[in-house]
Image (cartoon, rainbow, N blue to C red):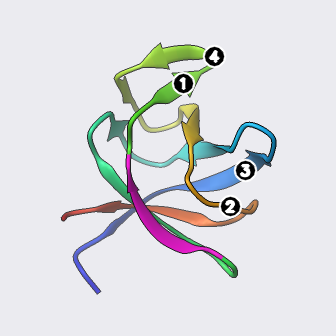
Amino acid sequence: MSDEKLIGKITHYYNVIGVGIIELSDKLKKGDTVHIKGKNSDFEQPVESIQIEHDKIDEAKKGDVVGLKVKQKVKEGDEVYLSNK
C-alpha cells in the first residue's frame, strides 16, 4: 500500500448525479488524487471538482462537508484517502 492519508468519510451518495458527500478530517484540493475504499468500492480518481452547497471551490479544509463527483458508486461510511501518486 502506498503512503496514503485518511482525509474523510462518505456521508451520503447521490446516485442520479454520481456525487459523494465527504465529511473532511483534513484538507482536499482540486488536482489531488483520492482513493475511496469501502466494502464494495476501491478505486482512485483525480479531484476535478469540489463543491460546498453547490458552489465550486478549489480547496476545502478540515471540517468542511463537500460534494465530489465520483466515477463509481460509493456508500455511506466509505473512507476517503489522499493518494500520494
Residue nearest the observer in this picture, 42 or 82 = 42
Where's residue 46, x and y in %?
35, 49
Per the image, label 4 sits on a secondary structure element best described as loop
Q: Which residues are magenta?
A: 41-46
Residue 76 pos. (x, y %):
75, 60
The percent coordinates of residue 21 (x first, y second) are 66, 42
The answer to which quarter of the image holds residue 65 is top right
Mark 4 and mark 3 in contact (Cβ < 8 Å)? no
Q: Is residue 75 left or right of residue 51?
A: right
Q: Quadrant of the N terminus?
A: bottom left
Task: Looking at the image, tell me whether mark 3 or mark 4 is earlier in sequence order.
Answer: 3
Q: Are marks 1 and 4 in contact (CB under 8 Å)?
A: yes
Q: Nearer the viewer, mark 3 or mark 4?
A: 4
The crowd level at tag 2 (other Cα within 10 Å; few <14, some 14-19, many 20+) is many
Q: Which residue is mark 1?
A: 51
Category of crowding for the residue at label 3, using alpha-carbon neighbours closer than 10 angstroms: few (below 14), some (14–19), many (at least 20): some
Q: Which residue is mark 3?
A: 11
Q: Which mark is residue 54?
A: 4
Q: CA distance from mark 2 to mark 1?
A: 17 Å
SS class of the residue under badge 1?
Answer: strand
Where does label 2 land, which residue?
74
Q: Residue at x 72, y 50 (%)?
A: 11
Residue type for callout 4: His
Main secondary structure along the magenta-highlighted residues: strand
